[in-house]
């Protein structure tokens, strides 16, 4: 109920002068709208399978694109985080992957699921050009073999969607999808938040489309709320 009161207050202040407290209230109001938008952006499991199947893994580019899409869907990574991935970021022995945040200079370790590891390994064996000079995992197939940019990763997703006949799809939609599929599979909010590296439980609820009761169970009281 406290969260609802805060959101209602934020909506009522939209026409007020732009004071710092009003900006914070507006941000809380946008959380609700973003959660509604997330319902429209998450792909379902059938669409995910079609996206992956659209990659021709008998080709170098298909191997690369399949690995990129698998990472986005299974780990909920941002396009920039996939683009920044280096060979030394993959700890095959420990079964972990180091993620360099696209927001800031932080790094975190995530578990490397078997299917993600297999997709990356197949790309490294059959897709990544042997003449590549740098340490970036995902590169252009044609020379010069420069590292993929964030925009190039987004284009991989968009082109896969076009092959499937989907409406325009952005890489960030697959981040929503990863959270939603985890939720449907029985994962808890803290588990989803840990994978997506969220610092705020409300942010996780936007991605995972959590109902009000689930959100209330982990939300912290707003400053000034009466217990």
Image (spheres, rainbow, N blue to C red):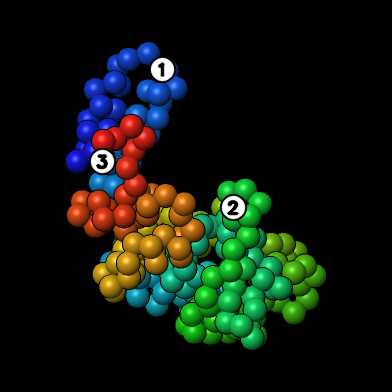
Labels 2 & 3 near each other (Cβ < 8 A): no
Name the residue: 64% across, 65% down: 85
Residue that badge 3 annotates? 227
Name the residue: 50% across, 62% down: 77
Q: Nearer the viewer, residue 56 or 70?
A: 70
Q: On the rendered structure, is 131 left or right of 127?
A: right
Quarter of the C terminus within the rendering: top left
- Sequence order check: which comes first, mark 2 or mark 3? 2
Q: Position of residue 55 (x, y in %)?
A: 46, 75
Q: On the rendered structure, is 33 left or right of 68?
A: left
Q: Secondary structure at mark 1?
A: loop
Labels 3 & 1 near each other (Cβ < 8 A): no
Q: Nearer the viewer, residue 111 or 153?
A: 111
Residue that badge 2 annotates? 102
Q: On the rendered structure, is 60 left or right of 48?
A: right
Q: Position of residue 80 (x, y in %)?
A: 58, 55
Where 205 falls versus 159 (above or below)?
above
Residue extending farthest front: 227
Crowdedness near tag 1: few (<14), some (14–19) or many (≥20) residues, C-alpha within 10 Å: few
CA gap between label 2 and label 3 equals 37 Å
* Residue 141 image-quadrant placement: bottom right
- Sequence order check: which comes first, mark 3 or mark 1? 1
Q: Position of residue 195 (x, y in %)?
A: 46, 65
Q: Secondary structure at mark 3?
A: loop
CA gap between label 3 and label 1 equals 29 Å
Q: Position of residue 207 (x, y in %)?
A: 35, 55
Crowdedness near tag 2: few (<14), some (14–19) or many (≥20) residues, C-alpha within 10 Å: some
Q: On the rendered structure, is 131 left or right of 3?
A: right
Quarter of the N terminus within the rendering: top left
Q: Which mark is residue 18?
A: 1
């Amino acid at each position: 109920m406290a969260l609802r009161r805060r959101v209602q207050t934020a909506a009522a202040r939209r026409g007020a002068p732009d004071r710092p407290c009003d900006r914070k209230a507006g941000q809380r109001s946008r959380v609700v709208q973003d959660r509604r938008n997330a319902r429209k952006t998450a792909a379902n499991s059938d669409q995910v399978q079609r996206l992956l199947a659209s990659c021709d893994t008998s080709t170098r580019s298909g191997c690369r694109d399949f690995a990129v899409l698998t990472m986005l869907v299974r780990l909920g990574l941002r396009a920039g985080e996939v683009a920044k991935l280096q060979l030394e970021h993959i700890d095959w022995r420990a079964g972990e992957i180091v993620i360099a945040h696209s927001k800031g200079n932080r790094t975190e370790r995530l578990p490397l699921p078997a299917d993600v590891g297999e997709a990356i390994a197949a790309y490294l064996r059959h897709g990544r050009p042997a003449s590549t000079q740098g340490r970036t995992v995902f590169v252009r197939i044609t020379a010069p073999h420069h590292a993929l940019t964030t925009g190039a990763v987004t284009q991989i997703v968009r082109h896969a969607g076009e092959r499937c006949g989907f409406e325009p799809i952005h890489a960030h939609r697959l981040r929503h999808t990863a959270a939603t599929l985890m939720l449907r599979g029985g994962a808890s909010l803290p588990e989803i938040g840990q994978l997506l590296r969220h610092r705020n439980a409300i942010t996780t609820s936007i991605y995972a489309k959590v109902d009000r009761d689930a959100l209330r169970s982990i939300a912290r009281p707003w400053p000034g709320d009466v217990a």
